[in-house]
Image: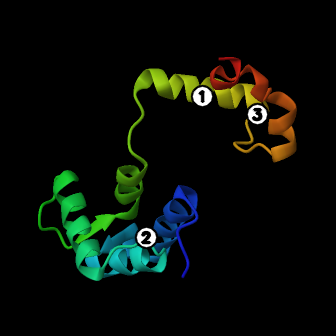
Amino acid sequence: GRVPAGLPPVLAAFEAAGASAAEGVLDQESFSQCCLGQNLGFSLHECRCIFRRLADEHGAPGCAALPAAAIVRAIRGQLPAQRLAAVHEAWVRLAPAGRGEVSSQELLAKLDVRRLPTVLS
């Protein structure tokens, strides 16, 4: 069967579900269907448990719906400030025009893998 293709498609699925939902919120059923549609390996019961846990963490225990943006933030998580600054600096170096994306050709042209710590040691 299909397997998840990584975090970006999962986040995009929740963002799209939120965009098509009334007021950008997902109820437990919409959340569960989104999880199941992404083949994350969770049962329907597990999806419902995850939704309840997200509601608890969002400060709304027992709520019937959550903003899709809150779900995406919970999935994405928070980077520590120092790491966030390092990621931002790397993106500025890789994509100085601020496009937010880098082609594989651009990445290969700028990245010398021979300088990576595991290669040097």
- The disc, 1 or 2, on the residue closer to the chain's N-terminal end is 2
- Residue 63, compared with residue 82, is above or below; it is below
Q: Residue at x 35, y 55 (%)?
A: 70
Q: CA distance from mark 1 to mark 2?
A: 29 Å
Label 2 sits on a secondary structure element that is loop
Please provide percent x and percent y for residue 94.
75, 31
Q: CA distance from mark 3 to mark 1?
A: 10 Å
- Residue 82, compared with residue 57, is above or below; it is above
Relative depth, front residue between 107 and 12 = 107
The residue to which callout 3 is attached is 95
* Discs 2, 3 touching: Cβ within 8 Å: no
The image quadrant of residue 79 is top left
Q: In the image, what residue type sits under mark 2?
A: Leu
CA neighbours of label 3 inside 10 A, class few (<14), some (14 to 19), many (20+): some
Q: Residue at x 25, y 67 (%)?
A: 51
Q: In the image, what residue type sits under mark 3?
A: Ala
Residue 88: numbered disc = 1
Q: Residue at x 36, y 59 (%)?
A: 71
The image quadrant of residue 27 is bottom left
Left or right, residue 87 beside residue 103: left
Please provide percent x and percent y for residue 32.
33, 77
Please provide percent x and percent y for residue 53.
20, 60
Q: CA distance from mark 2 to mark 3?
A: 31 Å
The residue to which callout 2 is attached is 40
- The disc, 2 or 3, on the residue closer to the chain's N-terminal end is 2
